Amino acid sequence: MKKLTLLLVFFGLFAAVQTHAQTPGTKGNGQVFFSETFGWANPADDKGWTAPAGYYFVDALDNGTNFKWWPGTEGFYTLYTQDPPLNSTTKDNGFMANFIEQFNWQSGVLTTTPVDNSLGFPTLNCSTHSSVIVRYQTHFMAYSVAHMWLEVSVDNWVHSANYNVNFACGHKDRPADKPKGEPALLEVNISDVAAGMPEVRIRLHWLDTYMYYWAFDDFTVSEAYNNDMSVNYVKMEWDDGDDATAMAWIANIPKSQLNATSGFMNFESGALNFGEYDQEAAYLDVDISKNGNSLFHKMSTPTDVNVLTVDTARIADKYAPADYGHYKINWEFKQKVADDNTVNNKRSILFNVTDSVYSRSGEVNTLGWSMNKESYNTPDAEETNHFCGSIFPIFNDCEVSSISVFITGGLADPMLNYHFSLFFQTPGEAIEASPEILVSDNKQLDSADFNTWVTMPLSKDGESEFLKKGDKVYAGLTFDNTHPNYLDRRNNGLEIGTDNTVGLTESSTVAIYRGGSRTGIGDFFGKRNLMIHLNLNDHGNRVDGVDLRPEAASMGQNYPNPFRETTAIDFELTNGSEVIFQVMDLTGRKVMEVNNGMMPAGKHTYNLSTSSLDAGIYFYTLRAGDFVQTKQMVVVD
């Protein structure tokens, strides 16, 4: 069988119920014509579930592994995996999963039987569809390299096109850096292979690993929007005055650290033409504002972008902030014809010029990250003096006073203790040779620390706290994890918040442990942007220098829209609060209300199921504390 590899740019008592559905002849603007929610529970079947007609399973190595139906209340727990169930839109009726680690963990011994399994879907007739988009919700954890494919054939597997669906995940990564159990949305445009074809076969294929798991749910096939430029990433550099380096962005910069070369430059974004039509005169628009007033507005050179082509645009101009304040940067891809899907063609981030707070990351946690996941010792050894922190170049003389770390979790008991550390990088010396020049008091990890900024002052000696222009220091957290069970150390280590909203141009993180160090943009440690503040002894602007939180919560437009049955709503909370979603019809009658309970500050996605609603126009409202916002959505047949 010839294979063509393509690039994905970014996703008795009861009879078995056939939950998939195909609608012929739909056209345009994201309409779904095939859907599957995997409600396959069947107590009359010895295995507890039955796949509907047309689905099939492949065990290429004949070793007994495969995808299977998974109850929505059951998580993934074994030796190295400690994950809750997939929190998909229709998780209550179950989802599909392959828990290869559970298969390999037998009788107290971890074997290395590799996975090579596929789940095939019923043959689809796409002859009346001029574009074909596959979407599903998923979560997994990768081991080494995640070989995960969506395979498509139009000639009964004589030939196939293979789309990489691993979210570019490396060792121990999760899709889109989603927290445990939270679904990432996978989207693949397979129009170049499937559009207009009468017999389209699709399967999901996982191979070449023996650890962790892959789960997915709410699989749909739809037509594309006519005009849809989808932003994959944004990044920019901070000008450090050295043409040989590409310094990653700085989210909070004290005014005292600004100098003649300071500023953001080389604003870059990549966007995929995910729509049905070629786009004329597409360009990147970057705007920087403060208090709603635009201070910097630049556009890249327009270019035509064909369907399924990625346009990478860069704006080299520099913006140099000069005064205290909260600033907002908007990236947006625009084109000659207005975009039909305005949810995925833009990104926004905040940065601040402060008096005392210096940090490489933003203020909203993307994913809690534990150094112990990779740095754990053998079963009979403990972890002591393990350090992870952020890299801080010093642009002007200053005095440091304290360190703050956003802590998100861990096993809180007397056997996990930590203190904050400041290491000084001696020029010409290895990172691991850097002396620890300032420390805080030692502290036992407490659950009261979770999802908060923990600040501790540094003990001063009258000299080391004064840093000079040109110095480089590492500020972060040093911990001792003395749990006798190495699985407790590995699986429940101290977690720190990370921020992945802006792509890194170089590493801003370093780890020092067991006599060595690790950093670098491709490293397990170095690719993270840790939520750490280095606080200076400067309080000249108490208002803008203290409160770094976004001014208000926010809610995005649902996606897709229009839609059938399920849609995703992104929202962001500035403070932990009770979250309630309400849906009203055109008469103002409340037709749905979902209370999600208390949720922490940060970015979230709510998957709204409207299977009980008739087609029509509705309004959805987010209520979170004092924040209330309403937007319109369209449900179609």
Image (cartoon, rainbow, N blue to C red):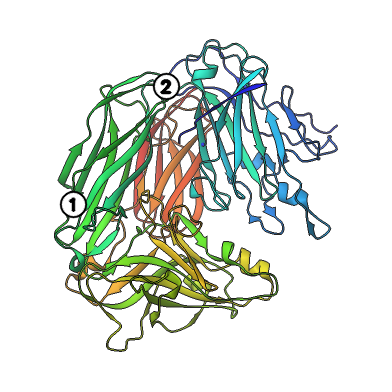
Marks 1/2: CA–CA distance: 35 Å
- Which of 400/391 is in front? 391
Q: Name the residue beneath numbered marker 2.
A: 29
Quadrant for the N terminus, please. top right
Whether residue 611 is visible, yes or no, is no
- Which of 151/95 is in front? 151
Q: Specify the quadrant of the image occupied by residue 53.
A: top right
As shown in the figure, which amino acid type bears the numbered disc 1? Lys
* Above/below status of 104 relative to 334: below
Q: Is residue 572 left or right of residue 538?
A: right
* Contact between labelled residues 2 and 1, with CB atoms less than 8 Å apart: no
Q: Residue at x 64, y 43 (%)?
A: 214
As shown in the figure, which amino acid type bears the numbered disc 2? Asn
Q: Identify the residue at the far bottom of this view.
A: 461
Q: Name the residue beneath numbered marker 1.
A: 290
- Which of 468/190 is in front? 468
